Amino acid sequence: MATNDGGERRATEASTAAAAAAAPKTAWDDAAWAQSRLSLPDPIRIPLAATAAFAVGMGLGAAQGSTMAGMRFRAEHAHKLPQTTTGWYLYHKSKNYHVAHGGIREGLKMGARVTVWTTAMFAIETLFDKYRGQMDLANTVLASVTVAGGFSLWNRFPLATAARTTKTALLVGLAYGGVQDLASVLRGRPVSYVDFVKKRFRRAGAGDVAPPADSQQEHSL
């Protein structure tokens, strides 16, 4: 009985190991983490970016919305200010409610807008990565400029405003893409233009060090 149990256990372990080896690789594999932008696979990096964008948009929108709501409330009630302690208590209580309501509403709206455009930028960047087969700042710049163009068209900006928006997106794409490429170089991941420059320098150095074959023959004679 013990022999049979041991054989069955070994057979089960072998089948489990074979199934694990034959299972398709997922985004959680070490290779996927190492070869991804910022060492974060796309299924993790894009949701994280969307969450961070929503948090930033929520904070900015809440600050702006609460300020505007407070100013609007004071303007609407400037002609009928309370005269008693109870009246002032109710006045400030009502104002705080309007400020909180305006901040939350504007925060949710701005957070949603920032999340949509940020997610679009990261998704387009990933599409360019897959299409070109390379991950470098060129894809980041293209994604940033594309989203800036779509944002300008959606808001019907005039030409001058659209140009400024595109210029800002270009600078942001260069900065963010450069940071990602620097992280890739430090982690030993290939970057197309960095590898190109390295090859050119290696060829130039090899040409300077190795003398021509004709000169070697003349010296031998």
Image (cartoon, grey):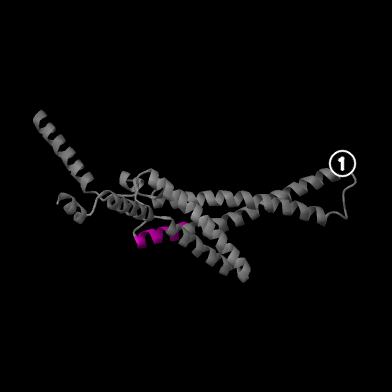
Q: Residue farthest to the right?
A: 83
**Which residue corresponds to the image point at 40% horizontal and 55% vertical from the top-left?**
136
Check residue 202 for magenta coloring: no
Residue 219 position, x and y percent, is 18, 50
The residue closer to the viewer here, 113 or 200, is 200
Quadrant of the rendered structure where residue 148 is?
bottom right
Mark 1: which amino acid? Thr
Q: Is residue 77 left or right of residue 177?
A: right
**Which residue corresponds to the image point at 73% horizontal and 54% vertical from the top-left?**
68
Q: Is residue 49 left or right of residue 65?
A: left
Find numbered disc 1 in the image and state the secondary structure of the residue it sits on: helix
Residue 210 position, x and y percent, is 24, 50
Q: Which residues are magenta?
A: 122-132
Q: Residues within 10 Å of mark 1 (few under 14, many from 20)?
A: few
Q: Residue farthest to the top?
A: 2
User: Disc 1 designates what residue?
Assistant: 85
Check residue 127 for magenta coloring: yes
Say whether residue 157 is visible. Answer: no
The relative height of residue 99 versus residue 139 in the rendered view (above or below) is above
Q: Main secondary structure of the magenta part?
A: helix
